[in-house]
Image (cartoon, helix red, strand yellow):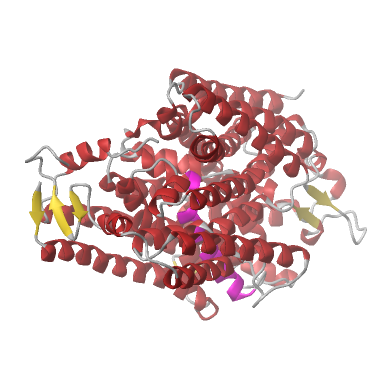
Amino acid sequence: MDSQFLVSLVIILSTFALYIWIAVFNTAKQTSDFYVAGRGVPPIFNGMAIGADWMSAASFIGMAGTIMLLGYDGLAYIMGWTGGYLFLTILLAPQLRKFGRFTVPEFIGDRFNSKAALIIAAICTIIISFTYSIGQLSGSGVVIGRLFEIDAKIGTMIGVVLIAFYAAFGGMKGITWTQVAQYIILIIAYLVPVIFMSLQLTSNPLPWISYGEIVTKMGELDRELGISEYFAPFTNGTKWQFLALMFTLMCGTAGLPHVIVRFYTVGTMKAARWSGAWALVFIGLLYFSAPAYAAFARFILMTEIAGKKIAELPAWTQSWIDTGKLGIVDTNGDGILQWLELKIANDIVVMATPEIANLGVFVIGLVAAGAMAAALSTAGGLMISISSSFAHDIYYRIINPQASEQKRLLVGRISIVVATLLAGIIALNPPGAITQIVAWAFALATGTFFPALVLGVWWKRANAKGTMAGMLVGLTVTLVYIFSAKYGGFTILGIIDTGAGIFGAIAAFATNIIVSLSTRPPSQELQDAVINLRYPEQMTYKDGEVYLNDGSSKDQ
Amino acid sequence: MKKVDQKVADAYFREKNRYMLVYFAIWFLVSYVVVAFADSLTEIQFLGFPFHYFMGAIGALFTFIVLLFVNAIVGDKIDKKYGIDDERNKEIGAKNMIDH
């Protein structure tokens, strides 16, 4: 056992101890606490918790590597995963808050007064959260694999046990405050190496400004090597793919059940607006840094690793080769590693760079702890979504309405364990890079919930039949496109599997509108409830009139 | 409970929507439009970056954050203008939690 292993392990374990302490301190006792944390979290902390929930293994471990390998084309992830917050914060969150239901399926069930719609929405929630959690488990596999210098597969199995245990016990109340702690750990863990590298390479402690010159310099290096410049647009896909991916990620952001449920934890529509704004600040800290991380990592690899004799490569190379994610093949047999002979997987760039740049055992351990925080916090939120969809929406509201609170909690916990195990089995052989797997979850949310929620909130004429048909058609189109693009080589305008959401969304919007218009309009009461969402809590729309609740009489 | 004139209620809704359209117009411009013209922006340098790269990595995200804070502040102002009391909202919001 080397000192790196010990340091990393101690840092990971002590951060875990902190999360568990907070979770135990707040152990969920009642179901309403378990799902939405009693709705009293102030916007700034709620923003941090949204940030931790949001920034998953895909953002922390995967994104910088994806940008490093795709260059400008990878920036679709930066704009897509942040631009969606405008949809979420302006178009949906405050209105959903005013409607006042626990989960997205419940909103859909009650807005359209349809149990069938509720079930379809619950199933979509489970599919989306499940796909997303495969990416998280695969990420925890990379971290644990590197830590113990074992294959990432075994690392994934250890991650499964951790996440199942963690999510089944915390509940959301534990998770809200735990996530504030996780946000702080993960952002420090991400910023420290970027700032160090910035100092090393540019002697400027502010990476967000300093990496421009590195990007420009790499363009020159690329020209010398005869490959396309790092910043050249659309070299790894068509412009349409870039736009479709960005659209998919944006709409998916606004349709992800585990993120939307966060907005039920705030008190008012006003607090929902502020939570969204704060969330994007906290998320932005990492997203501004990811392209800098990518640029520094690539520059260091190009200038300090490429060109070395293969026999003299530092020790870290072997540990990463052991995880199965780094490949070095001396194609031309000259004993020297050329840039093009280095095959590095997207998913290890963030984890490996601190070692490559020689930032010391402490920083490397910190990054490992941050990566675990990212994977765990999101997996926690996802598992709560899955368990509430199953235990609350399907089991309690449909199968067994007499179930006691204890029984519902038990069913919730069992569904968490089952979901984690299943996702873990798929993650053993991840079907793609982490960002790619997560992008599929976004595509599914774009094809199902985004149209259903936007029309449900903004168009009173949308009815149950239209929305159910829309969700089913959107789900089918998205799934078929993902599979045929990935395995069948079928593409339209060069849009690949990750951009599939745009087709799902178009199909779902069209279906929803056409079917709604050709069937009976929703009852007057439901239409009034939609108009009511235009106004703040204090204003109520009833029978064609708007009332201001100034507390002057007892009725509300 | 006080009845609100339908005109006032409509004005509230319209005013919010007007702002919303402006936000989304800017949002569209800094993301989709810039990407659509990325090929022709590569030669322009900005803060040491090629301009299209700067917008993708920093400019768009920065604009999104500003827009969300403007939305939150303007939203509060509009509420105030129409006599909405946030404390009252909180009371109503706290009751508005339907547990089945």
Residue A78 visible (yes or no): no
Residues in magenta, as a range: A238-258
Residue A28 lies, in percent from the top left, at: 45, 23
- Picture layout, residue A78 above or below residue B91: below
- Picture layout, residue A473 above or below residue A433: below
Q: Horizontally, is A38 left or right of A142 in the view?
A: left
- Picture layout, residue A549 above or below residue A469: above
For the C terminus of chain A, the quadrant is top left
Secondary structure predominantly adopted by residues drawn in magenta? helix
Which residue corresponds to the image point at 43% horizontal and 38% vertical from the top-left? A49
Q: Horizontally, is B27 left or right of A160 in the view?
A: left
Which residue corresponds to the image point at 36% horizontal and 58% vertical from the top-left? A457
| Residue lying at the far right of the rendered structure | A333
Q: Is residue A365 magenta?
A: no
| Residue lying at the far bottom of the rendered structure | B40
Residue A153 lies, in percent from the top left, at: 78, 38
